[in-house]
Image (tube, helix red, strand yellow):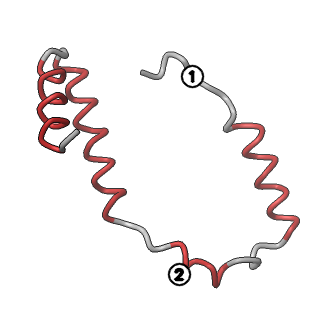
Amino acid sequence: MSNNTIVTQVIEKLSRLPDELQRKVLEFVQALTVSARHGVPGGQLLRFAGVIPLDDLQLMRLAIDAGCEQVDVNEW
């Protein structure tokens, strides 16, 4: 599928959505374009490997397990 076909399909489906949902799609696309422009290749981050103490990593894992594995089905 070509990029032009994808864009055409997105525009067609987007035009059928109410304004509020179109605004959400715009915000989502803007977030994607911002995140696509920032960042560094993973290889540049390797120098940081192993610098976080194991105790801190365990605390981070516990916090993630406690708060990030929940799904809000009403979010969208």
Label 1: few (<14), some (14–19) or many (≥20) C-alpha neighbours in 10 Å: few
Amino acid type at mark 1:
Asp
Q: Which residue is mark 1?
A: 72
Residue sitting at 42 percent across and 21 percent down? Answer: 76
Residue sitting at 76 percent across and 77 percent down? Answer: 50
Q: For the residue labelled by badge 2, is the local secondary structure a helix, a strand or a loop?
A: helix
Q: Residue furthest right?
A: 55
Q: Tell me which numbered mark, 2 or 1, is placed earlier along the sequence.
A: 2
| Percent position of residue 28, x then y | 31, 39
| Percent position of residue 42, x then y | 53, 72
- The residue closer to the viewer here, 58 or 49, is 49
| Percent position of residue 74, x then y | 49, 16
Residue sitting at 11 percent across and 21 percent down? Answer: 15
Pair 2/1: label in front: 2
Q: Residue furthest bottom?
A: 47
Q: Is residue 10 left or right of residue 75?
A: left
Query: Quadrant of residue 70 in the image?
Result: top right
Query: Quadrant of residue 7 in the image?
Result: top left
Query: Quadrant of residue 23 in the image?
Result: top left
- The residue closer to the viewer here, 3 or 72, is 3
Q: For the residue labelled by badge 1, is the local secondary structure a helix, a strand or a loop?
A: loop
| Percent position of residue 43, x then y | 55, 78
Q: Quadrant of the N terminus?
A: top left
As drawn, 56 above or below 62: below
Q: Is residue 8 left or right of residue 50?
A: left
Mark identifier at residue 44: 2
Amino acid type at mark 2:
Gln
